[in-house]
């Protein structure tokens, strides 16, 4: 009898369709599944008495009580269900708007467990749309931590969790740790054999973080090994020479509806020189939010197109990709060139057409998300790979696009301010360009951390701005299962307030692309002057007439992310305001943002304050984690690679090489 290595197909309930769905999550084999990174970690809420809820406003808590009263009202299409729950110490109302089906879940005198965040309202404390556990469908145990898994079409997060648990039970003993214990200790990582259990059922956030870092590290080390090989191979040339003369360049620059800044001209000059060579460009373009990076990247794509080459333009979210495709199409059309869009939401008929046109060379610029990595995406003559908001991607993903053509020119763009000294360590193989000048004519932007009394004045301020015709973003940055719910609750509050007459729209990551585009268009066109959103709008929303942003729970987001978010306002000539609500625990971060409006200065200040070891704080988002939390891992991978290439080669083989979105967390 020959022994066959166990595969994903050995898991209960997994057939070819689920194997494909798992592949979309970056899981190609059992090892990948064991090391699959949860999207986030959430607290399951501590149990408290109803009488003590006032001490826990806004926190994730549990109460247990009996249903004392229920009322249900309809107003036209809307409805409100109120359920009063009582224990020995007091009572609290659960409120559900427009969820009439919830009625059937409650019976008088029934014992229920409630999980949510209590809020103040006119009639005292309430839970808005809390989760409720009953004997039949209990909640996860209170007072613990729960990993939230990613999901994809045909594979829900709960099912992913079950598969991981099964893989751990049946195949968990297959991981060996090749790295020395002192290296792991030094870098805050768990040994590999302990990682799967700690990812699935972490004891606490530290335990989770140590496991997550180790899982990420194997991908990183593999990707770095490949990047190094690639860069050795690339020195020999082989890139498409995209040379344009001065007239041609002037024609390209004139396609844009503005005067280029001096910094933009300088960078375009650098790119032009790089693109004219057969040595593949490897360039990182850094610039603060709104400094005009994307425009420069597009200019490079037009230069490539003028020389007959195609460009792949990768963006981290569908929203951003859609916006780029829409705003670039007319510029390209004016140059007699074509733009196409490819994302996970592209209908299959359109997808087939786009793939055909990319292959034939009819499309000059292909804008898209992770969908671009797919092996079916084949270019006729790929000259340039451009990655927008590159800090949202892993090294592995960058490499994956270069698989389409190893000698393509590569332009990375980022607004995550990384101090120059550090940029060199992190991106040693890259040349760095800097956009250090803002386009002229932008109004002043004021940032305020709202404390108690300010909150009372806020409605008046908002009313004043809206009456003046301004546009307002209201951001609710909850994550995980709560993501959409937090924003929905804010939307309900807005819709039932006096300000609803200005028109309110809601966007979050769970809307389909067409619906999201429709709602954004209503906001852009002024039909709705308030946009309630999750952090999906962090990148890619460009509405110059929006002048006010309010961020709830800002303490849940890191410095870099808050800075990026506030970049949505201050894009026009009018003055603008960015207002944060947040717990005092985040005082340092919020005060820094109040005082400093420049992303690079912020990063320097932050670095000086914490030192390199805690660079992760650039994007420390409370219970979730983002890629930059792990910048120091990139440094560790480089160290290890320099000191001990054999270990990395072993890791590269074990890790199976770069894969899809494993190390991109927190992309809404
Ligand atoms: P970034 O990618 O750095 O955040 P964008 O390229 O998206 O910045 O530019 C932000 C906004 O400023 C866009 O609306 C863009 O059209 C505009 N813009 C870019 N460059 C200039 C310029 N030189 N003058 C005026 N507006 C500009
Ligand atoms: Mg941009």
Image (spheres, helix red, strand yellow):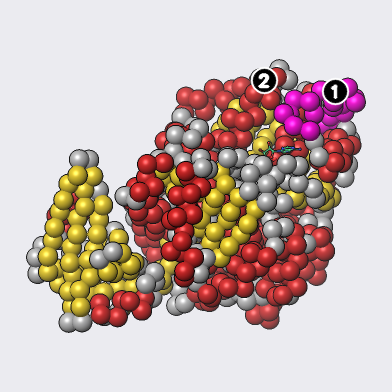
Residue 625 occupies quadrant:
bottom right
> Which residue appears at 38% of the width and 63% of the height?
166
Bounds of the magenta segment: 238-259
Answer few, some or many: residues within 10 Å of disc 1's Cα (few below 14, many 20 plus, some between 14 and 19).
some
Q: Quadrant of the N terminus?
A: bottom left
Q: Residue at x 19, y 44 (%)?
A: 75
Q: Vertical placement of 404 versus 243: above or below?
A: below
- Residue drawn at the location 76% of the way across and 46% of the way down: 438
Side (left or right) of 610 relative to 620: right
**Camera-nearest residue between 272 and 179:** 272
SS type, badge 1: helix
Total numbered labels placed on residues in the image: 2
Q: Which residue is mark 2?
A: 333
Q: Position of residue 464 (x, y in %)?
A: 48, 49
Q: Is 467 one of the magenta-colored residues?
A: no
Pointer 1 residue: 248
Q: Earlier in the sequence, mark 2 or mark 1?
A: 1
The main secondary structure of the magenta stretch is: loop
Residue at 45%, 73% (x, y): give it: 202
Where does the image place residue 141, in percent across and percent down from the top left? Answer: 31, 74
- Depicted 399 relative to depicted 189: above or below: above
Q: Is residue 243 magenta?
A: yes
């Amino acid at each position: 009898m020959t022994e066959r290595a166990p595969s994903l197909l050995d898991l209960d309930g997994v057939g070819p369709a689920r194997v494909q769905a798992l592949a979309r999550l970056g899981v190609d084999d059992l090892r990948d599944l064991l090391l699959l990174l949860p999207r986030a970690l959430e607290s399951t809420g501590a149990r408290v008495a109803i009488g003590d809820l006032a001490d826990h406003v806004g926190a994730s808590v549990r109460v247990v009580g009996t249903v004392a009263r229920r009322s249900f009202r309809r107003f036209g299409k809307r409805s409100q269900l109120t359920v009063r729950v009582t224990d020995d110490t007091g009572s609290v109302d659960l409120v559900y708007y427009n969820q009439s089906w919830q009625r059937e879940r409650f019976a008088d005198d029934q014992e229920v467990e409630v999980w949510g965040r209590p809020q103040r309202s006119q009639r005292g404390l309430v839970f808005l749309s809390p989760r409720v556990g009953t004997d039949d469908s209990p909640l996860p145990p209170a007072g613990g931590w729960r990993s939230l898994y990613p999901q994809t079409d045909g594979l829900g997060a709960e099912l992913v969790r079950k598969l991981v648990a099964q893989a751990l039970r049946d195949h968990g003993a297959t991981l060996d740790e090749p790295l020395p214990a002192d290296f792991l200790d030094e870098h805050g990582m768990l040994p590999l054999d302990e990682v799967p259990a700690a990812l699935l059922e972490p004891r606490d956030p530290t335990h989770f973080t140590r496991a997550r870092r180790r899982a990420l590290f194997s991908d990183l080390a593999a990707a770095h090994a490949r990047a190094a090989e690639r860069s050795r191979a690339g020195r020999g040339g082989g890139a498409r020479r995209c040379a344009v003369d001065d007239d041609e360049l002037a024609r390209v620059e004139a396609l844009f509806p503005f005067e280029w800044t001096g910094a933009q001209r300088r960078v375009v000059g650098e790119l032009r020189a790089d693109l004219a060579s057969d040595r593949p460009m490897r360039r990182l373009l850094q610039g603060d939010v709104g400094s005009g990076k994307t425009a420069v990247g597009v200019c490079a794509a037009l230069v490539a197109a003028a020389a007959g080459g195609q460009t792949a333009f990768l963006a981290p979210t569908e929203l951003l990709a859609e916006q780029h495709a829409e705003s670039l199409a007319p510029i390209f059309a004016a140059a007699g060139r074509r733009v196409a869009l490819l994302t996970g939401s592209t209908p299959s008929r359109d997808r087939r057409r786009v793939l055909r046109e990319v292959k034939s060379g009819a499309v000059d610029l292909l804008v898209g998300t992770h969908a671009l990595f797919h092996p079916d995406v084949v270019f006729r003559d790929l000259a340039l790979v451009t990655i927008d908001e590159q800090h949202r991607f892993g090294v592995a993903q960058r490499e994956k696009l270069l698989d389409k053509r190893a000698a393509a020119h590569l332009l990375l763009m980022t607004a995550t301010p990384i101090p120059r000294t550090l940029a060199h360590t992190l991106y040693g193989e890259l040349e760095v360009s800097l956009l250090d000048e803002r386009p002229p004519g932008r109004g002043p932007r004021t940032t305020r951390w709202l404390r108690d009394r300010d909150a009372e004045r806020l409605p008046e301020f908002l009313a004043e701005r809206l009456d003046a015709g301004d546009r307002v973003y209201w951001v609710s940055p909850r994550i995980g299962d709560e993501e959409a719910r937090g924003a929905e609750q804010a939307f309900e509050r807005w819709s039932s307030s006096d300000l609803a007459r200005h028109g309110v729209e809601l966007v979050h990551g769970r809307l389909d692309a067409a619906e999201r585009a429709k709602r954004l268009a209503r906001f852009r066109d002024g039909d709705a002057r308030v946009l309630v959103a999750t952090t999906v709008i962090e990148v890619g929303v460009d509405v110059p007439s929006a002048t006010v942003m309010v961020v709830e729970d800002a303490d849940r987001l890191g410095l870099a992310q808050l800075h990026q978010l506030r970049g949505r306002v201050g894009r026009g000539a009018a003055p603008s305001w960015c207002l944060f609500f947040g717990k005092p625990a985040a005082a340092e971060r919020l005060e820094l943002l109040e005082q400093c409006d420049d992303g690079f200065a912020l990063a320097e200040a932050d670095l000086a304050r914490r030192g390199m070891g805690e660079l992760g704080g650039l994007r420390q988002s409370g219970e979730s984690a983002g890629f930059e939390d792990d910048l120091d891992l990139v440094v560790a991978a480089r160290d290890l690679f320099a000191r001990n290439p054999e270990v990395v080669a072993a890791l590269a083989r074990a890790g199976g090489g770069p894969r899809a979105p494993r190390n991109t967390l927190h992309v809404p």
